[in-house]
């Protein structure tokens, strides 16, 4: 049996893994998220075990059990539960349903609904020289510092064909029925960034097949509506976080990106993004 802690922005979660084979896959895929402990100093929240049919994930806080056979599905479900509890308990930072990357100490936070292409676009940014922070939850504090939870990028089945052109080490992919887990170093050698970065821009990506490329600067009002629609833990914050987040939005440039695939992005688009965050 192995015991782990997951800590982020003042929230700590206990994880117990009873299966040796499950321990190996969790450490290889979530090694930048979980920390091995001799004994847990907090109450166990999640437990992973296995039987003859595959893996078993128990969420002891919600009394929910998940089962599956493929390792990729375990990583997806386990990281999803970890992110849920980190956001649900957080009272010190704004938790957004958003991907995040950084470069030169400046972070780009990309709020988006599921299916709008934020994970795929995150993989493209990593392939174009940005540091990976998160593909699902970004945390922003009152000083506009951004923290991510660097689980593997989760790519749905219908997005894998486009992503494979970015992958340099396919042996690092872990496949599941729901998603494939894509470690950032499967795209380009790097160490996932666990330090906070200063928020330099919001980018709202939206993928729609055959859609032409467009990139425009947004007003603070437009940005505010989209950010708050992707705010996960507002109920935990003073005044539902509105005043503090409004101050963050007013001083942070925001951009809307529409694209129909990587082939529709301009050849110099990474430079255009860099110019936008360097000019904040």
Image (tube, helix red, strand yellow):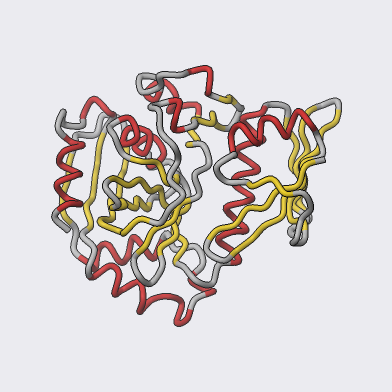
In the image as oriented, which residue stretches furthest toward the front?
Answer: 38
- Residue 178 vs residue 257: left or right? right
- Name the foreground residue: 233 vs 93: 93
The residue shown at (60%, 44%) is 79
- Name the foreground residue: 232 vs 142: 142
Q: Quadrant of the C terminus?
A: bottom left
Residue 57: x, y in percent? 75, 42
- The answer to which quarter of the image holds residue 206 is top left
Q: Is residue 25 above or below residue 230?
A: above
Count of numbered circles on the image: 0
Residue 69: x, y in percent? 73, 27
- Residue 231 vs residue 56: left or right? left
- The answer to which quarter of the image holds residue 186 is top left
Residue 83: x, y in percent? 57, 52
The residue shown at (28%, 67%) is 249
The residue shown at (82%, 26%) is 53
Q: Quadrant of the N terminus?
A: top right
- Name the foreground residue: 146 vs 52: 146
The residue shown at (64%, 60%) is 12
Q: Is residue 198 above or below residue 108?
A: below
Residue 65: tell me if it is visible.
no
- Residue 214 vs residue 132: left or right? left
Residue 275: x, y in percent? 14, 46
In the image as oriented, which residue stretches furthest toward the right?
Answer: 52
Residue 134: tell me if it is visible.
yes
- Name the foreground residue: 218 vs 4: 4
């Amino acid at each position: 049996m192995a015991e782990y802690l997951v800590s982020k922005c003042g929230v700590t979660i206990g994880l117990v893994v009873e299966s040796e084979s499950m321990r190996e896959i969790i450490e290889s895929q979530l090694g930048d998220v979980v920390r091995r402990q001799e004994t847990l100093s907090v109450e166990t929240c999640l437990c992973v075990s296995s039987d003859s049919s595959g893996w078993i994930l128990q969420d002891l806080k919600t009394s929910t059990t998940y089962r599956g056979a493929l390792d990729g599905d375990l990583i997806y479900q386990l990281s999803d539960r970890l992110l849920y509890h980190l956001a649900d308990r957080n009272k010190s930072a704004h938790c957004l349903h958003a991907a995040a990357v950084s470069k030169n100490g400046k972070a780009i936070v990309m709020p988006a609904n599921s299916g709008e292409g934020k994970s795929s676009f995150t993989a493209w940014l990593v392939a174009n020289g940005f540091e990976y922070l998160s593909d699902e939850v970004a945390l922003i504090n009152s000083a506009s510092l951004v923290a991510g939870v660097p689980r593997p990028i989760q790519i749905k089945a219908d997005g894998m064909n486009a992503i494979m052109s970015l992958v340099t080490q396919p042996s690092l992919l872990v496949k599941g029925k729901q998603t494939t887990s894509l470690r950032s170093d499967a795209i380009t050698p790097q160490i996932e960034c666990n330090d906070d970065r200063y928020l330099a821009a919001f980018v709202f990506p939206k993928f729609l097949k055959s859609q032409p490329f467009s990139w425009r600067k947004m007003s603070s009002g437009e940005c505010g509506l989209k950010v708050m629609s992707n705010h996960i833990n507002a109920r935990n914050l003073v005044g539902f976080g509105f005043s503090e987040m409004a101050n963050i939005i007013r001083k942070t440039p925001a951009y809307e990106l529409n694209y129909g695939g990587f082939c529709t992005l301009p050849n110099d688009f990474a430079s255009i993004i860099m110019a936008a965050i360097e000019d904040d």
